[in-house]
């Protein structure tokens, strides 16, 4: 059992390294987005917050962030004279501004905090699907909106990185499921092996008590290990992965 457990653990570790390498590919974009957010100051956020009618690109950036957080646009009369065929028309994006102002930028210093604390692993697929349509919009470009607002540029980078991370995470999910399954098998074998060693030690003790004059053959509990010193703790990485 020990050899089988070690073999499974090695397979699981190789799988973990592959998963980690894949997920690391999405981290540079996220780190760049966080750096852009950290460079913002309250004055810049305040300027955007008090724009009565921000340009389309800026409004689109805030609409995307509201969607990521699950915030709804303000209700309005659908008979308004705007292009209802375009879900990301200027008017449609402006509908998110009151929510963005009250939920994300009040006070202005809260904006970066909210985005920093957003759980990147939480994004549901329906929201990701909506965000993909925004990411492909010609105005959703950090360089384009950056000439008007550093805040909007940082938001664009954050959304692009968030969607990119979600795509990688979705792609590797089957391999992550396999990894967790391997870890559970390792844990099961680990417990069985520990139980068998404990039973062997108990049996030898009872036999020694019953026949104190009869010497017992050596117990092969491991290379160079004394049976009372044999320890087989659950690996920390195993415990952590099983409870993620």
Image: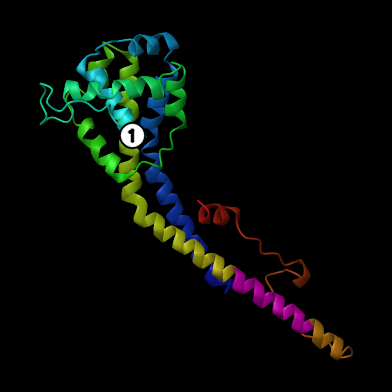
Q: Measuring 62% from the left and 73% from the top, which residue is drawn there?
A: 193
Q: Residue furthest right?
A: 213
Judging by the rendered image, the residue that carries numbered circle 1 is 68
Q: Residue at x 66, y 64 (%)?
A: 232
Question: 224 above or below 28?
Answer: below
Residue neighbourhood size for the residue with mark 1, other residues' Cα within 10 Å, grouped as few (<14), some (14–19), many (≥20) = many
Query: As drawn, is 183 to the left or to the right of 71?
Result: right
Which residue is at 41% across, 15% downward?
40
Q: Is residue 229 left or right of residue 27?
A: right
Q: Quadrant of residue 215?
A: bottom right
From the viewer's side, name the closer residue of 3 and 170: 170
Residue 126 position within the rendered picture, expressed as x and y whole percent measured from the top left: 27, 43
Find the magenta span and give its range: 191-204
List x then y, in percent, for residue 199.
70, 79
Principal secondary structure, stretch drawn in magenta: helix
Rendering coords of residue 95 (x, y %): 25, 23
Q: Which of the 4 image quarters holds residue 145?
A: top left
């Amino acid at each position: 059992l020990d050899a089988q457990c070690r073999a499974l653990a090695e397979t699981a570790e190789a799988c973990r390294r592959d998963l980690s390498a894949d997920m690391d590919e999405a981290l540079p974009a996220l780190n760049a987005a966080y750096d852009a957010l950290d460079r913002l100051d309250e004055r810049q956020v305040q300027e955007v917050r008090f724009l009565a009618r921000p340009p389309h690109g800026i409004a689109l950036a805030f609409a995307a962030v509201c969607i990521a957080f699950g915030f709804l646009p303000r209700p309005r009369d659908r008979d308004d004279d705007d292009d209802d065929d375009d879900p990301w028309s200027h008017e449609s994006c402006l509908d998110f501004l009151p929510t963005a102002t009250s939920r994300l930028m009040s006070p202005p210093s809260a904006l970066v905090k909210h985005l920093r604390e957003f759980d990147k692993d939480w994004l549901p697929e329906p929201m990701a699907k909506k965000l993909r349509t925004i990411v492909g919009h010609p105005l959703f470009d950090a360089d384009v909106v950056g000439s008007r607002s550093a805040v909007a540029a940082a938001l664009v980078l954050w959304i692009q990185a968030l969607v990119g991370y979600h795509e990688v995470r979705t792609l590797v999910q089957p391999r992550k499921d396999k990894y967790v399954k391997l870890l559970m098998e390792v844990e099961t074998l680990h417990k069985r092996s520990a139980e068998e060693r404990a039973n062997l030690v108990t049996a030898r003790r009872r036999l020694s008590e019953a026949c104190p004059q009869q010497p017992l053959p050596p117990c092969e509990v491991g290379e160079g290990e004394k049976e009372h010193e044999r320890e087989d703790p659950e690996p920390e990485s195993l415990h952590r992965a099983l409870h993620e």
